[in-house]
Image: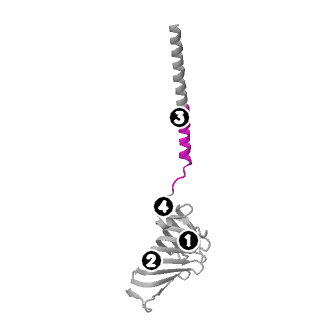
Amino acid sequence: MNKRKKKLRIIQVSLFILGLVVIIFTYGEIGVENNQQIVTEKKPKIISNFSKKEKNIEGDVFINIEYSGLDLAGNRYILKSAEAYNSTSNSKIVNMKTVQATFYFKDDTVLNVWSDRGQYNNKTLDMKFRGNVKAIYENSTLYAGQADYSNSNSFLTISKNVKINDLRGIIVADKLLFDIKKQKLNIASFNEGKINANIKLK
């Protein structure tokens, strides 16, 4: 009887251990599967360097976007941005950061414009450049606080601390109007109608 009891106990213990092993592996695999599902269902975080006010936006931030087309004057343009997001109040407006615009004119000249921030109207094709605006056209380099491109008027209006470095000299003005069609630059000043200019005539 003792041998029989010992055999029964050994069988019972073996079955108990086997049952524990089965339970551990079964629930362990379920836990792994659940963890895997949680990880895959997580959406990637969109990281941006916009200010705190700009980060309170609804929707996604798009990285390295590019717009291209023809303006009403028939000139080709390319507008690039490191980061951009659609305006929640106006679906036509695209807000941008680290902006570069290139205008290719029919006479084969090129106008490049850079700024910290910008705005693009994807219906009217108007553009706004804000913060550390820099523009290069032929042998002239321009610096300003802001610039606005009107597609309907074919004008680029440049204002706020405007300064032009040219082969002929340095021009400081309150406002510059660049006529895209005629490719002419009109200089205006709000300071008693005077323009601070240092131009080399030769």
Q: Which residue is mark 1?
A: 120
Question: Which of labels 4 and 2 is toward the front?
Answer: 4
Amino acid identity at mark 1: Tyr
Q: Which residue corresponds to the image point at 54% horizontal and 18% vertical from the top-left?
A: 12
| Kind of residue sitting beneath label 4 | Ser
Reading the image, the residue beneath label 2 is 145
Q: Nearer the viewer, mark 3 or mark 1?
A: 3
Q: Residue at x 51, y 57 (%)?
A: 46
Of 201 and 2, which appears nearest the observer? 2
Q: CA distance from mark 4 to mark 2?
A: 23 Å
Q: Which residue is mark 3?
A: 28
Above or below, 168 against 29 in this view is below
Separation of residues labelled 1 and 4 (CA atoms)? 19 Å
Specify which label sits upstream in the sequence, 4 or 2.
4
- Residue 81 rendering spot, x and y as whole percentages: 51, 66
Q: Amino acid at mark 3?
A: Gly
Real-space CA distance between mark 4 and mark 3, rounded to the nearest whole angstrom: 39 Å
Mark 4 sits on what residue? 48
Count residues near mark 1 (Cα–Cα under 10 Å), then give few for <14, some for 14-19, many for 20+.
many
Say which label, 1 or 4, has the lower sequence index: 4
